[in-house]
Image (cartoon, rainbow, N blue to C red):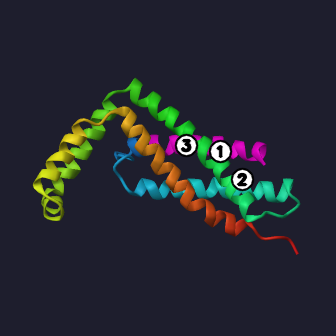
Amino acid sequence: MLKPTLKYSILCGVFLIGLFFISINFGSNPLLDMRHFFFDLGVFLLFIYFGGKEYKDYHNGGYLHFWQGISIGFVVIIPATLLFSGAFYVMFQANPELLEAYKEGARAMLIAKKDLYIERFSEEQYQQQLTAVDNETTLRLLFSTFWKKIIAGFLITPVVAIILRKKPK
């Protein structure tokens, strides 16, 4: 089960990296934009589906149990996210301006929604958030992004496992 799905994992990681670059080049900050989370869900859906479909049709005689679908999802998600995280780290170390651009975007987003934030929380918490943005590091941003991608993959994996678990007649 591992070998046939690893190629989908590598391709998924490459697509995540490509999506990140495309988002940046179109002026969207994928670390701040919630739409990027939905793109990640779509990428994971496609690659988990095709990895599971190949395993089901060519390596398992047309059968796929739910646990096999979950396992295939994990085999796709984890290496893809690790590949993306490695590329993310290299990009941010090679270009420190990316971290500064993130900080500027996060600050601008907080300032734009200052009244709403203060109304819901407090002035003190708002100031703490601004300070936290200024103190953000590449590693903290890396771990945050890593866990967001893992969670996105874990959300979509059971859906794909249920779709693919059908047995031939």
Cα gap from disc 3 to disc 1, whole angstroms: 9 Å
- Is 51 rendered above or below residue 103? below
In the image, residue 59 lies at what x, y percent?
85, 53
The segment highlighted magenta reads 1-21
Which residue type carries mark 2? Answer: Gly
Which element carries disc 1, helix, strand or loop? helix
Q: Find disc 3 in the rendering and name its residue.
A: 81
- Is 141 rendered above or below residue 91? below
- Whether residue 79 sits left or right of residue 120 in the image: it is right
Q: Of marks 2 and 3, which one's residue comes earlier in the chain?
A: 2
Q: Find disc 2 in the rendering and name its residue.
A: 51
Residue lying at 69% horizontally and 69% vertically, measured from the top left? 163
Residue lying at 51% horizontally and 56% vertically, measured from the top left? 152
Foreground residue among 53 and 122: 122
Which residue type carries mark 3? Answer: Thr
Q: How packed is label 3: few (under 14 Cα within 10 Å), some, or many (20 or more)?
A: many
Q: Of marks 3 and 1, which one's residue comes earlier in the chain?
A: 1
Cα gap from disc 2 to disc 3, whole angstroms: 16 Å
Residue lying at 49% horizontally and 55% vertically, measured from the top left? 39
Which element carries disc 3, helix, strand or loop? helix
Q: Find disc 1 in the rendering and name its residue.
A: 9
Mark 2 touches mark 3? (CB < 8 Å): no
Residue lying at 50% horizontally and 33% vertically, measured from the top left? 87
